[in-house]
Amino acid sequence: MERQVKAQLHASPSRSSKTLKDHTRIETVVEVAGVGRLVLDVDSAGGYSLRAYPEGSEAPSRNLLAVGVMRAEGIVAIHPEELSAVEGEQGASRSERSSDV
């Protein structure tokens, strides 16, 4: 079975939607005027990341909110604070399995 990424975008519940498909990845950017933007990136292997960019701040070192991998048996999520620990101590990462993310 060929892997594919599919996203369905809604402007609001009562409006029509648009479906996007890609073989490798989809990146979705949601911008809120005067506040900033959120970027969700999902690849066909199930990997994902969610980043926030508050308006006026594009500092890449503090924008990661979540990263992980979706699998049939659940979601493996790594929290950003754990990534900091891994950078300081190789192999010290702790993963959390959760099916309700």
Image (spheres, rainbow, N blue to C red):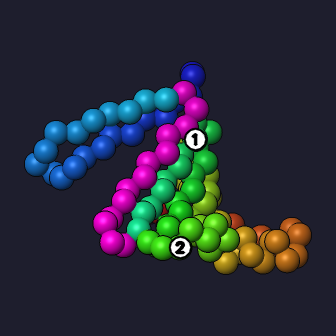
Locate the N terminus and report the quarter of the image it occupies: top right
Q: Position of residue 32 (x, y in %)?
A: 33, 65
Label 1 environment density (alpha carbons within 10 Å; few <14, some 14–19, many ≥20):
many
* Residue bearing mark 1: 43
Counting residues from the start of the chain, the first of labels 2 and 1 encountered is: 1
Q: Position of residue 7 (x, y in %)?
A: 39, 39
Q: In percent of the image, x 55 and y 37: which residue is there?
A: 25
- Span highlighted in magenta in the image: 23-35
Q: In percent of the image, x 78 and y 77: which residue is there?
A: 85
- The answer, for residue 34, to whether it is visible in the render is yes
Residue most extreme to the top? 1
Q: In percent of the image, x 48 and y 56: which residue is there?
A: 39
Q: Nearer the viewer, residue 18 or 47?
A: 18
Q: Position of residue 23 (x, y in %)?
A: 54, 27
> Which element type, helix, strand or loop, lies under badge 1?
strand
Q: Nearer the viewer, residue 92 or 71?
A: 92
Label 2 environment density (alpha carbons within 10 Å; few <14, some 14–19, many ≥20):
few
* Mark number displayed over residue 57: 2
- For badge 2, the amino acid type reads Ser
Q: Quadrant of residue 80?
A: bottom right
- For badge 1, the amino acid type reads Asp
Q: Is residue 94 left or right of residue 50?
A: right
Q: Is residue 26 above or below residue 48?
A: above
C-alpha distance separating marks 2 and 1 = 26 Å
> Is label 2 or label 1 in front?
2
Label count reads: 2
Q: Is residue 9 above or below residue 39?
A: above
Q: Nearer the viewer, residue 7 or 39?
A: 39
Q: Position of residue 35 (x, y in %)?
A: 36, 73
The reply to whether the magenta stretch includes residue 26 is yes
Q: Is residue 8 left or right of residue 58?
A: left
